[in-house]
């Protein structure tokens, strides 16, 4: 079971992000073609995602929350109880920072660290509409921690949001494209 799951994780890690990015482009193209670009932009401006963020002025990277002393202490306590392979990665990737996946360019937040049988650690991340323009929000697993880099918040001119498609909507769009 671990061997099969591991193979599945490697498959997702190497090929999982590219189809999702292509799917987002396809969905956006279909929406633009169907309802028009102006309507899409109007929808994204009419229903923006408002979130308050703080910027760490020293590193110029975004904090998605400003951690309290209790939260930092709880994180450090949690970190001490982890296996060494997780501690090494988790010490570099803190949960209150915003990261970018190098392969796809999506800004993401950390959800979890997954430890595998050979002491390899991967990350589970959330691709959210408050930091990206996406067809749908999601969690992605099997991300190599080396593929994550700290990043800053979207600029004021950058359009962020979600078209809000469900999995069923995406399947329907893909199936329509096949016919």
Image: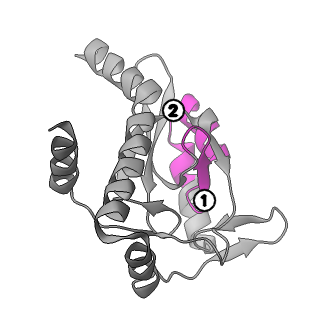
Q: Residue at x 31, y 56 (%)?
A: 30
* Foreground residue among 49 and 111: 49
Alpha-carbon neighbours of circle 2 within 10 Å: few (<14), some, or many (≥20)? Answer: few
* Foreground residue among 116 and 70: 116
Q: Quadrant of the N terminus?
A: top left
Q: Is residue 65 left or right of residue 133?
A: right
Q: Is residue 14 left or right of residue 158?
A: left
Rendering coords of residue 90 (x, y %)? 59, 43
Q: Residue furthest bottom?
A: 46
Q: Residue at x 54, y 35 (%)?
A: 86
Rendering coords of residue 53 (x, y %)? 61, 77
- Which residue position is annotated with label 1? 98
- Which residue position is annotated with label 2? 83
Q: Dot 2: what SS?
A: loop
Q: Residue at x 29, y 67 (%)?
A: 164
Q: Residue furthest top?
A: 3
Magenta span: 77-104
Residue 94 drawn in magenta? yes
* Foreground residue among 176 and 43: 176
Relative to 177, residue 3 above or below: above
Rendering coords of residue 114 (x, y %)? 42, 36
Q: How many marks?
A: 2
Q: Quadrant of the C terminus?
A: top left
Q: Dot 1: what SS?
A: loop
């Amino acid at each position: 079971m671990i061997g099969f799951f591991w193979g599945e994780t490697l498959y997702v890690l190497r090929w999982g992000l590219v189809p999702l990015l292509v799917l987002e482009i396809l969905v956006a193209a279909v929406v633009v073609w169907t309802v028009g670009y102006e309507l899409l932009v109007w929808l994204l401006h009419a229903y923006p995602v408002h979130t308050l963020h703080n910027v760490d002025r020293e590193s110029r990277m975004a904090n998605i929350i400003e951690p309290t002393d209790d939260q930092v202490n709880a994180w450090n306590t949690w970190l001490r109880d982890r296996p060494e392979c997780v501690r090494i990665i988790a010490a570099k990737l803190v949960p209150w920072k915003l990261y970018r996946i190098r392969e796809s360019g999506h800004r993401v937040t950390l959800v979890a660290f997954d430890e595998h049988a050979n002491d390899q650690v991967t990350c589970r991340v959330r691709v959210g509409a408050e930091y990206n323009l996406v067809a749908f929000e999601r969690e992605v697993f099997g991300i190599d921690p080396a593929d994550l880099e700290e990043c800053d918040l979207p600029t004021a001119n950058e359009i962020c949001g979600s078209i809000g498609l469900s999995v069923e909507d995406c399947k329907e769009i893909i199936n329509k494209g096949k016919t």
